[in-house]
Amino acid sequence: MKLIIGNKNYSSWSLRGWLAAKQSGLHFEELTVPLYGEDWEEAKRQQGEFQPSGGKVPVLWDGDVVIWDSLAIMEYLGDKVGRDRFWPKQDEARGMARSMVAEMHSSYLPLRRQCPMNIRRKSAIELTEETKQDIVRILGLWAEARARYGKGGPFLFGTFSAADIFYAPVVSRFITYGVGVPGFAQAYVQAIWEHDWMQEWIAASEAEEWTISQFEVTEDA
């Protein structure tokens, strides 16, 4: 398999696709196309042979199968290796996890727009009311998941799962922009940030030489 991603410092949806590929346990080759770099427009022009998603990332190639959109990639990998690797086994927990992932996939535009992922940056900003509302909603979901289903470990549903994959970039945003969170959420933020895969991604993002000063990341949505 080949996974096409954008810059690790900036591309939140690439992080989700990459974490899903790591969670699958399957071997995959990683191909990086720098967002808005010299190869970016060429990659979009050649999307018929490279990116059928219209120049968005991530994209997964598995033989003749091409999957784009991070949620579709995760579900495809779940079909290959067993969905229990990604989702809680209990029906009620799985239902909540799916709802949380779907909400993350389709919502929180104020947070995304005001606080784009930028792992190398560490600078607090004044948040808009709309962004604050997004954060309150996310913290409420985290609290409910942890209280109801998180007793088996430090993650949202105990063990690392699809929900953690999709909220990992939110953790990154909270750290980047100095978002204060209550104690239970701080423990979760730390658990995500210190996860071996996140540390691998962070180290790679810090080693990147690409810089995008002002950008609107073209990713899946």
Image (spheres, rainbow, N blue to C red):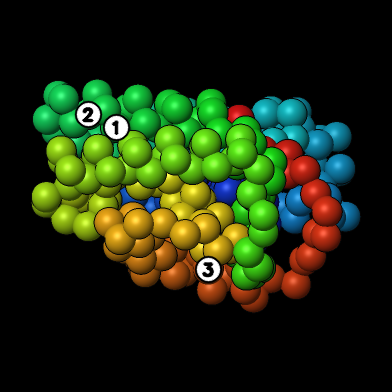
Q: Is residue 32 left or right of residue 181?
A: right
Q: Check the image and report above or below for 131 versus 29.
A: above
What amino acid is at disc 2?
A: Arg
Q: How many marks?
A: 3
Q: What is the CA distance from the residue labelled 1 to the residue labelled 2? A: 5 Å
Residue wearing tag 3: 202
Q: Nearer the viewer, mark 1 or mark 3?
A: 1
Q: What distance separates the C-alpha of mark 3 from that of mark 2?
A: 29 Å
Left or right: where does residue 28 sit relative to residue 100?
Answer: right
Residue 194 placement: quadrant: bottom left
Image vertical order of residue 173 relative to residue 205, above or below? above
Q: Secondary structure at mark 1?
A: helix
Q: Nearer the viewer, residue 5 or 48?
A: 5
Q: Can residue 108 be seen? A: yes
Q: Are marks 1 and 2 in contact (CB under 8 Å)?
A: yes
Query: Which residue: 55% across, 63% down?
Result: 178
- Residue for point 26% across, 28% down: 96
Query: Which residue bears the numbered disc 1?
Result: 97
The residue type indicated by label 1 comes to: Ala
